[in-house]
Amino acid sequence: MADATTFQPCVIPVLRSFDAQRAAEFYQGFLGFVQDWTHRFGDDFPLYEQLSLRSAAGLACVLHVSEHHGDACPGSTVRIAWPQLEAFQQSLLAKNYRYAKPGLERMPWGMLEMRIADPFGNQLVFFEELPDAPGSAGG
């Protein structure tokens, strides 16, 4: 199994952004993503960037965020498996981010979920399988 330094995701979602500063405030400042790299074709061109978020357990999430028209559709939803979701949610609430106070919801399909909308209408759904879920190792 790959460790966090060699993690290669099989799918990297592209999410639409309309403002690099607001995207940085949300993804990096609030959620804790790290900017891995950026690309612009020149000064005053749209930004395309890769962001990653690593859990304490070494799990990584990689997203591409693009200001380019046509790269992605605003209002998309991305589901992100995340261990120790309640601790992550509490760390986000402690930041007292003005535009999001995410809650947790137990879903009837055996998942704990936290839904957060970014400033551009995209939905990020962080989820963790509950140990007592039907079909899980513990259920």
Image (cartoon, rainbow, N blue to C red):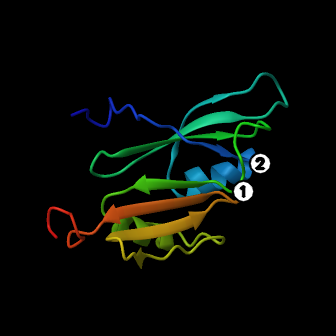
Q: Position of residue 117 (x, y in %)?
A: 62, 64
Location of residue 42 (image quadrant) = top right
Please give the label number shown on residue 32. Answer: none
Q: Earlier in the sequence, mark 1 or mark 2?
A: 2
For mark 1, does the 10 Å Cα neighbourhood hold few (<14), some (14 to 19), or many (20 or more) residues? some
113 with respect to 40 (left or right): left
> Residue extending furthest top?
41
Q: Secondary structure at mark 1?
A: loop
- The image position of residue 78, as x and y in percent, is 53, 53
Q: Nearer the viewer, residue 101 or 112?
A: 112
Q: Position of residue 79 (x, y in %)?
A: 48, 55
Kindly give the residue lying farthest to the left in the view shown: 138
Q: Amino acid at mark 2?
A: Asp
- Measuring from the top left, give residue 106's x and y in whole percent: 38, 77
Quadrant of the snapshot with the N terminus = top left
Query: What residue lies at 35% left-to-right and 51% top-to-bottom?
Result: 55
- Res 41 quadrant in image: top right
Q: Nearer the viewer, residue 71 or 32?
A: 71
Image quadrant holding the C terminus, namely bottom left
Three-letter amino acid code of the residue under disc 1: Phe
- Mark 2 and mark 1 in contact (Cβ < 8 Å)? yes
Quadrant of the image occupied by residue 29: bottom right
Q: Residue at x 75, y 40 (%)?
A: 67
| Label number found at residue 120 | 1
User: Cα distance, mark 1 to mark 2?
Assistant: 9 Å
- Image side of residue 49 versus residue 103, left or right: right
Q: Is residue 19 above or below residue 117?
A: above
Q: Residues within 10 Å of mark 2 (few under 14, many from 20)?
A: some
Label of residue 19 in the image:
2
